[in-house]
Amino acid sequence: MWVKNKKIILILVSLVIIAGAVFAVIRFYKGKNSESTKPKPSTNIPHIYQTSSTTPQALQEPVGVRTDFASSSPEGFPQGLPIEQKPITIVYSYKVTFEGSASLNKPPHTQLTYSYITKTSALAAGDAFAAYFNANGFSVVKNYDSAKGVYTLTAKKGTSDVFNLLVAVSNKDLNEQVVAVGEIIQK
């Protein structure tokens, strides 16, 4: 029962990360990189991260503590992960630590999320992540849609470490891609 719930939790959190990345892609694509619509790192984000009151109780996470890293990648990613430390723009960068809940069968875990704009192609960026994960003992499932310029990847190591990656065109005119990488680490 616990293993099944862990898988469901990991899948739900993974979908949230991917949904956030898709939102970032849409936001950047619609803005055509104009200064007035270009997202800027936020310095006024609440430090307590909680789900909406409309989320069913069974799916709600306990309150988590969010730490934002406006000008760098979040602390805690593994050494050598092929993320750009100085990208064109950092869309968002944060870490949320959840205490978990025994009554809801939700284990304690940490979510690291980093999204940025790069000139590296979706295929090259995605393949760099795939090579890193394969070399470090992760099982990898990847997909590249050349027509849309979208690369998705999920990498798992056991049940306690899961990565999700989305690389997609941000602005075709400027040959820019948005990269969104998230890691869920169960304690």
Image: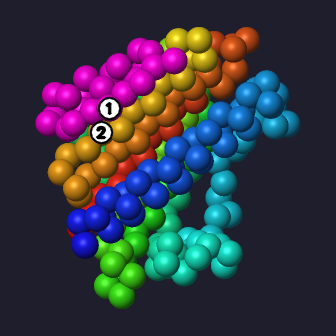
* Of 172 and 95, the residue lying toward us: 172
How many labels were placed on the picture?
A: 2
Amino acid, disc 1: Val
The location of residue 56, given as percent across then percent down, is: 58, 76
Q: Is 82 covered by the magenta stretch? A: no
Q: Give the secondary structure at mark 1.
A: strand
Which residues fall within the magenta stretch? 123-145
Q: Are circles 1 and 2 on residues that touch, CB within 8 Å? A: yes
- Name which residue lies at 35% across and 44% down: 163
- Name which residue lies at 73% across and 11% down: 173
- Name which residue lies at 30% across and 26% down: 130
Amino acid, disc 2: Ala
Query: How many neighbours does mark 1 have within 10 angstroms: few (below 14), some (14-19), or many (20 or more)?
Result: few
Q: Disc 1 marks which residue?
A: 141
Query: How many neighbours does mark 2 have within 10 angstroms: few (below 14), some (14-19), or many (20 or more)?
Result: many
Q: Is residue 178 above or below residue 120?
A: below
The location of residue 118, given as percent across then percent down, is: 54, 23
The quadrant of the picture occupied by the C terminus is bottom left
Q: Disc 2 marks which residue?
A: 155
Question: Taking the image as drawn, is residue 20 in sight?
Answer: yes
The location of residue 105, given as percent across then percent down, is: 33, 78
Q: Give the secondary structure at mark 2.
A: strand
Horizontal side of 121 relative to 35 (left or right) equals left
Question: Taking the image as drawn, is residue 95 in sight?
Answer: no
Mark 1 vs mark 2, foreground winner is 1
Q: Is residue 59 above or below residue 26?
A: below
Horizontal side of 10 relative to 159 (left or right) equals right
The quadrant of the picture occupied by the N terminus is bottom left
Q: Is residue 35 above or below residue 159?
A: above
Horizontal side of 104 relative to 118 (left or right) equals left
- Name which residue lies at 55% across and 35% down: 116
* Of 23 and 178, the residue lying toward us: 23
